[in-house]
Image (cartoon, rainbow, N blue to C red):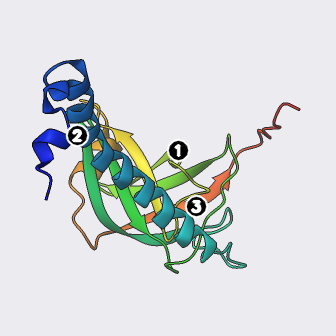
Amino acid sequence: MVPLKSVFNWNVLNGPTGYALFGCLLVLPLLFQRLYRRYKRTARSQQSYISESPSINPDTWTDLEFTSKEILSPDTALYHFKLKDEREVLNIPTGHYIEVRVVLDGNEKIRHYTPVNPTENVGHLDLIVKTYVLGQVSKYFTQLKAGDKVRFKGPMGEFIYEDAK
């Protein structure tokens, strides 16, 4: 049996080559994780569909269940709401928005938000909301607990985005 030391010159790893190899060992798991997430998202989207009776529509208010939030910065968070069907995609056109209605101290407040990734999210609606010091509705969002219902209507808007050809 030939010793491994005589077959491979291990001193090569002491310089820039070693740093490059070490860097690859750090980056490859992150790359595979990102590729796996993309694969899972693609697999989910192939099983998704655009519903004939979507969870929200422009004519009536619909309650959606709040599921979770992700803090993006000290005053901004990503809020997740569950659609009626876990395979549904809302397919909200670019340039359109949804309306949110909340009742605070007996007064109805309506705000407009643009969903995040509306054509890719399967089974949920995502909104990014910035909390303002005097913002009543944005403060309402910060107090949501899993299972709370929020009223939505949409999509709204007249802007039609046409891709440059």
Point out the frontmost of discs 1 and 2.
2
Residue 61 in sight from this viewpoint: no
Quarter of the image containing the C terminus? top right
User: Is 98 left or right of 131, judged from the image as shown?
Assistant: right
Mark positioned earlier in the residue sequence (2 or 3): 2
User: Mark 1 is on which residue type?
Assistant: His
Q: In the image, what residue occupies the spot 68% across and 40% down? A: 95
Q: Residue 147 in the image: x percent, y percent?
A: 28, 74
Crowdedness of circle 1 by 10 Å Cα count: few (<14), some, many (20+)? Answer: some
Task: Tell me the kind of residue under disc 3.
Answer: Lys
- Residue 156: % across, % down: 67, 50
Per the image, the residue denoted by label 2 is 26
Q: Position of residue 22 (x, y in %)?
A: 20, 34
Q: Judge left or right: residue 73 versus residue 126.
A: left
Q: Which residue is mark 1?
A: 112
Q: Is residue 162 left or right of residue 85?
A: right
> Which residue is denoted by mark 3 in the rendering?
153
Locate residue 5: give its quadrant: top left
Query: Which of pointers 1 and 2 lies earlier in the amino acid sequence?
Result: 2
How packed is label 2: few (under 14 Cα within 10 Å), some, or many (20 or more)?
few
Instruction: Count the labels in the image.
Output: 3
Q: CA distance from mark 1 to mark 2?
A: 42 Å
Secondary structure type for disc 1: strand
Q: Is residue 39 above or below residue 15?
A: below
Q: Residues within 10 Å of mark 3 (few under 14, many from 20)?
A: many
Please state which of residues 148 and 38 is positioned toward the viewer in this rendering.
38
Q: Measuring 49% from the left and 78% from the top, which residue is drawn there?
A: 86
Residue 115 in the image: state x and y as whole percent: 52, 49
* Numbered tag placed on residue 51 in the rendering: none
Residue placed most toward the observer, 70 or 106: 70
